[in-house]
Image (cartoon, grey):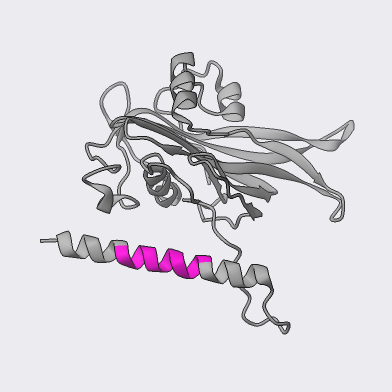
Amino acid sequence: MHSQSATHNNGQGAEVLARQGLRLPQVVLERLRDAGIYCQPTVSVEHQNLAKKYVVRGVESGGAVADFGAYSSFVSERGEALAWLQRVDSIGVNGVHAIVVAPVLVRVQMLRIARTYDLLVTRHFLANSPNNPRPRLESSILFYGRRGGLEMELWGKDVAFRGAVSPVFYTRAGESVALPQELRRAVTRITAAVCCLGCRHCHLLGPQPIDVEHAEGPTSADIVAQGETSAAVAEADSMRGVLDERAP
Protein backbone atom coordinates (compact mmCIF):
# COMPACT_ATOMS: atom_id res chain seq x y z
CA MET A 1 0.00 0.00 0.00
CA HIS A 2 1.53 3.30 -1.09
CA SER A 3 1.40 6.56 0.86
CA GLN A 4 -0.94 9.28 -0.33
CA SER A 5 -0.76 12.98 0.41
CA ALA A 6 -3.12 14.09 3.12
CA THR A 7 -6.09 16.18 2.13
CA HIS A 8 -5.38 18.78 4.82
CA ASN A 9 -1.86 18.46 6.15
CA ASN A 10 0.85 21.10 6.08
CA GLY A 11 3.53 18.72 7.38
CA GLN A 12 3.60 20.15 10.91
CA GLY A 13 3.10 17.47 13.51
CA ALA A 14 2.80 14.75 10.85
CA GLU A 15 5.05 12.40 12.82
CA VAL A 16 2.94 12.82 15.97
CA LEU A 17 -0.24 12.40 13.96
CA ALA A 18 1.06 9.19 12.37
CA ARG A 19 2.14 7.73 15.69
CA GLN A 20 -0.65 8.79 18.04
CA GLY A 21 -3.65 9.15 15.75
CA LEU A 22 -6.20 11.92 15.34
CA ARG A 23 -5.49 14.88 17.62
CA LEU A 24 -8.88 15.72 19.09
CA PRO A 25 -9.75 18.98 20.87
CA GLN A 26 -10.32 18.73 24.61
CA VAL A 27 -14.02 19.47 24.23
CA VAL A 28 -14.38 16.49 21.86
CA LEU A 29 -12.48 14.20 24.24
CA GLU A 30 -14.74 15.28 27.07
CA ARG A 31 -17.91 14.66 25.05
CA LEU A 32 -16.69 11.20 24.06
CA ARG A 33 -15.85 10.38 27.67
CA ASP A 34 -19.21 11.65 28.95
CA ALA A 35 -21.01 9.55 26.32
CA GLY A 36 -19.06 6.43 27.36
CA ILE A 37 -17.21 6.05 24.04
CA TYR A 38 -13.73 4.61 24.55
CA CYS A 39 -11.55 4.72 21.41
CA GLN A 40 -7.93 3.60 21.86
CA PRO A 41 -5.87 4.23 18.67
CA THR A 42 -2.44 3.67 20.25
CA VAL A 43 -0.10 0.97 18.96
CA SER A 44 2.82 -0.62 20.79
CA VAL A 45 5.80 -2.91 20.24
CA GLU A 46 5.56 -6.22 22.13
CA HIS A 47 7.95 -9.17 22.46
CA GLN A 48 6.83 -12.78 22.01
CA ASN A 49 9.02 -14.87 24.30
CA LEU A 50 8.19 -18.25 22.78
CA ALA A 51 8.56 -17.15 19.16
CA LYS A 52 11.49 -14.86 20.07
CA LYS A 53 10.27 -12.02 17.88
CA TYR A 54 8.67 -8.61 18.15
CA VAL A 55 5.20 -7.68 16.91
CA VAL A 56 3.02 -4.59 16.67
CA ARG A 57 -0.05 -4.65 18.93
CA GLY A 58 -3.30 -2.74 18.54
CA VAL A 59 -6.90 -2.90 19.69
CA GLU A 60 -10.21 -2.42 17.90
CA SER A 61 -12.32 -0.06 19.95
CA GLY A 62 -15.03 2.57 19.86
CA GLY A 63 -18.67 3.02 18.98
CA ALA A 64 -21.29 5.73 18.72
CA VAL A 65 -24.24 7.62 20.06
CA ALA A 66 -26.65 9.44 17.74
CA ASP A 67 -24.77 12.74 17.66
CA PHE A 68 -21.21 11.46 17.27
CA GLY A 69 -18.96 8.41 17.18
CA ALA A 70 -15.28 7.40 17.24
CA TYR A 71 -13.65 4.16 16.19
CA SER A 72 -10.21 2.69 15.54
CA SER A 73 -9.18 -0.66 14.10
CA PHE A 74 -6.64 -2.34 11.84
CA VAL A 75 -6.26 -4.05 8.47
CA SER A 76 -3.39 -5.62 6.57
CA GLU A 77 -1.02 -3.73 4.28
CA ARG A 78 -3.29 -4.62 1.35
CA GLY A 79 -6.38 -3.41 3.17
CA GLU A 80 -7.61 -6.93 3.90
CA ALA A 81 -9.33 -8.00 7.10
CA LEU A 82 -7.11 -9.37 9.88
CA ALA A 83 -7.94 -12.08 12.37
CA TRP A 84 -8.08 -10.98 15.97
CA LEU A 85 -5.77 -12.48 18.54
CA GLN A 86 -8.52 -12.26 21.13
CA ARG A 87 -12.03 -10.90 21.20
CA VAL A 88 -12.86 -8.82 24.27
CA ASP A 89 -16.36 -8.90 25.78
CA SER A 90 -17.46 -6.46 28.44
CA ILE A 91 -20.60 -5.31 30.23
CA GLY A 92 -20.30 -1.82 28.82
CA VAL A 93 -20.70 -0.73 25.19
CA ASN A 94 -18.61 1.40 22.81
CA GLY A 95 -15.34 0.16 24.29
CA VAL A 96 -12.58 -2.33 23.46
CA HIS A 97 -13.76 -5.12 21.13
CA ALA A 98 -10.65 -7.11 20.15
CA ILE A 99 -6.84 -7.29 20.23
CA VAL A 100 -4.61 -7.85 17.20
CA VAL A 101 -0.86 -8.44 16.76
CA ALA A 102 1.12 -8.59 13.51
CA PRO A 103 4.52 -7.58 12.07
CA VAL A 104 2.80 -4.72 10.21
CA LEU A 105 -0.51 -3.01 10.96
CA VAL A 106 -2.48 -0.43 9.02
CA ARG A 107 -4.61 1.60 11.42
CA VAL A 108 -7.94 3.02 10.29
CA GLN A 109 -9.34 5.68 12.62
CA MET A 110 -12.48 7.78 12.18
CA LEU A 111 -14.36 10.46 14.09
CA ARG A 112 -17.96 11.41 13.26
CA ILE A 113 -19.73 14.57 14.39
CA ALA A 114 -23.31 14.26 13.09
CA ARG A 115 -22.75 13.99 9.28
CA THR A 116 -19.14 15.25 9.25
CA TYR A 117 -16.23 12.80 9.33
CA ASP A 118 -12.46 12.85 9.94
CA LEU A 119 -10.44 9.88 8.67
CA LEU A 120 -6.83 8.92 9.33
CA VAL A 121 -5.12 5.84 7.90
CA THR A 122 -1.57 5.08 9.04
CA ARG A 123 0.97 2.29 8.56
CA HIS A 124 2.98 0.91 11.49
CA PHE A 125 5.94 -1.44 11.15
CA LEU A 126 9.14 -2.48 12.93
CA ALA A 127 12.57 -1.21 11.89
CA ASN A 128 15.92 -2.47 13.15
CA SER A 129 17.84 -0.29 15.59
CA PRO A 130 21.64 -0.36 15.10
CA ASN A 131 22.50 -0.24 18.81
CA ASN A 132 19.43 -1.86 20.33
CA PRO A 133 18.05 -5.41 19.92
CA ARG A 134 14.54 -4.01 20.37
CA PRO A 135 13.25 -2.65 17.04
CA ARG A 136 11.79 0.83 16.81
CA LEU A 137 8.24 1.52 15.69
CA GLU A 138 7.96 3.42 12.41
CA SER A 139 4.72 5.11 11.44
CA SER A 140 3.57 6.90 8.28
CA ILE A 141 0.38 8.53 7.03
CA LEU A 142 -1.39 6.80 4.14
CA PHE A 143 -4.51 8.98 4.05
CA TYR A 144 -5.74 11.93 6.06
CA GLY A 145 -9.12 13.44 5.32
CA ARG A 146 -10.81 16.15 7.37
CA ARG A 147 -14.42 17.29 7.41
CA GLY A 148 -15.66 14.77 4.90
CA GLY A 149 -19.40 14.67 4.34
CA LEU A 150 -22.05 11.96 4.07
CA GLU A 151 -25.66 13.18 3.97
CA MET A 152 -27.17 10.00 5.38
CA GLU A 153 -28.32 9.04 8.87
CA LEU A 154 -26.59 5.66 9.08
CA TRP A 155 -27.46 5.52 12.80
CA GLY A 156 -31.15 6.05 12.05
CA LYS A 157 -33.40 6.03 8.99
CA ASP A 158 -30.59 5.04 6.59
CA VAL A 159 -29.23 2.16 8.68
CA ALA A 160 -29.79 -0.29 5.80
CA PHE A 161 -26.95 1.36 3.89
CA ARG A 162 -24.40 0.88 6.66
CA GLY A 163 -21.34 -0.95 5.32
CA ALA A 164 -22.02 0.16 1.75
CA VAL A 165 -21.21 3.90 1.78
CA SER A 166 -18.48 6.21 3.06
CA PRO A 167 -17.88 9.99 3.32
CA VAL A 168 -16.51 12.14 0.51
CA PHE A 169 -13.42 14.24 1.26
CA TYR A 170 -12.29 17.40 -0.51
CA THR A 171 -9.12 19.40 -0.87
CA ARG A 172 -9.08 23.05 0.18
CA ALA A 173 -9.65 23.91 -3.49
CA GLY A 174 -12.87 21.90 -3.56
CA GLU A 175 -11.63 18.86 -5.48
CA SER A 176 -12.80 15.45 -4.30
CA VAL A 177 -10.10 13.11 -3.04
CA ALA A 178 -10.38 9.48 -4.10
CA LEU A 179 -9.58 6.82 -1.52
CA PRO A 180 -6.96 4.26 -2.55
CA GLN A 181 -8.74 1.22 -3.96
CA GLU A 182 -7.33 -1.11 -1.32
CA LEU A 183 -8.71 1.07 1.49
CA ARG A 184 -12.28 1.46 0.31
CA ARG A 185 -13.72 -1.65 1.94
CA ALA A 186 -12.08 -0.82 5.27
CA VAL A 187 -13.37 2.76 5.14
CA THR A 188 -16.97 1.66 4.48
CA ARG A 189 -16.70 -0.67 7.47
CA ILE A 190 -15.34 1.96 9.83
CA THR A 191 -17.99 4.42 8.58
CA ALA A 192 -20.53 1.86 9.76
CA ALA A 193 -18.66 1.55 13.06
CA VAL A 194 -18.86 5.26 13.94
CA CYS A 195 -22.64 5.03 13.37
CA CYS A 196 -23.14 1.84 15.43
CA LEU A 197 -25.09 2.92 18.53
CA GLY A 198 -24.06 1.06 21.67
CA CYS A 199 -21.52 -1.01 19.76
CA ARG A 200 -20.67 -4.43 21.18
CA HIS A 201 -18.98 -6.15 18.25
CA CYS A 202 -16.07 -5.89 15.80
CA HIS A 203 -16.48 -4.18 12.44
CA LEU A 204 -13.04 -4.81 10.90
CA LEU A 205 -11.25 -7.60 12.76
CA GLY A 206 -12.71 -11.10 12.55
CA PRO A 207 -12.28 -14.67 13.83
CA GLN A 208 -9.40 -16.87 12.75
CA PRO A 209 -10.28 -18.87 9.59
CA ILE A 210 -10.81 -22.57 10.20
CA ASP A 211 -8.45 -25.01 8.45
CA VAL A 212 -10.75 -27.81 7.29
CA GLU A 213 -7.78 -29.96 6.26
CA HIS A 214 -6.24 -30.34 9.74
CA ALA A 215 -6.26 -33.89 11.03
CA GLU A 216 -7.25 -33.23 14.64
CA GLY A 217 -10.81 -32.59 15.71
CA PRO A 218 -12.01 -29.00 16.14
CA THR A 219 -11.13 -27.20 19.35
CA SER A 220 -13.55 -25.07 21.34
CA ALA A 221 -11.95 -21.98 19.73
CA ASP A 222 -12.66 -23.46 16.27
CA ILE A 223 -16.31 -24.05 17.15
CA VAL A 224 -16.75 -20.50 18.48
CA ALA A 225 -15.00 -19.00 15.44
CA GLN A 226 -17.18 -21.05 13.07
CA GLY A 227 -20.32 -19.82 14.82
CA GLU A 228 -19.15 -16.20 14.63
CA THR A 229 -18.32 -16.56 10.93
CA SER A 230 -21.76 -18.07 10.21
CA ALA A 231 -23.46 -15.24 12.12
CA ALA A 232 -21.49 -12.63 10.17
CA VAL A 233 -22.45 -14.26 6.86
CA ALA A 234 -26.11 -14.39 7.89
CA GLU A 235 -26.04 -10.71 8.87
CA ALA A 236 -24.49 -9.77 5.51
CA ASP A 237 -27.12 -11.82 3.62
CA SER A 238 -29.88 -10.10 5.60
CA MET A 239 -28.44 -6.66 4.79
CA ARG A 240 -28.29 -7.51 1.08
CA GLY A 241 -31.93 -8.55 1.25
CA VAL A 242 -32.93 -5.19 2.71
CA LEU A 243 -31.01 -3.33 0.02
CA ASP A 244 -32.63 -5.49 -2.69
CA GLU A 245 -36.09 -4.69 -1.35
CA ARG A 246 -35.31 -0.93 -1.43
CA ALA A 247 -33.88 -1.04 -4.93
CA PRO A 248 -36.24 0.38 -7.60
Give the x, y percent position of residue 120.
47, 33
- Image quarter in which the C terminus is found: bottom left
Question: Which of the 4 quarters of the picture holds residue 224?
Answer: bottom right
Q: Which residue lies furthest to the front in this view?
A: 91
The residue located at (43%, 22%) in the rendering is 31
Above or below 28: residue 211: below
The magenta-colored residue range is 228-238
Question: Which of the 4 quarters of the picture holds residue 232?
Answer: bottom left
Give the x, y percent position of residue 201.
49, 51
The residue located at (32%, 43%) in the rendering is 166
Residues 99 and 144: in front is: 99
Q: Which residue lies furthest to the left in this view?
A: 248
Main SS, magenta region, reads helix
Question: Which of the 4 quarters of the picture holds residue 216?
Answer: bottom right
Residue 233 on the magenta segment: yes
The residue located at (44%, 49%) in the rendering is 186
Specify whether 140 is left or right of 167.
Answer: right
Above or below 81: residue 229: below
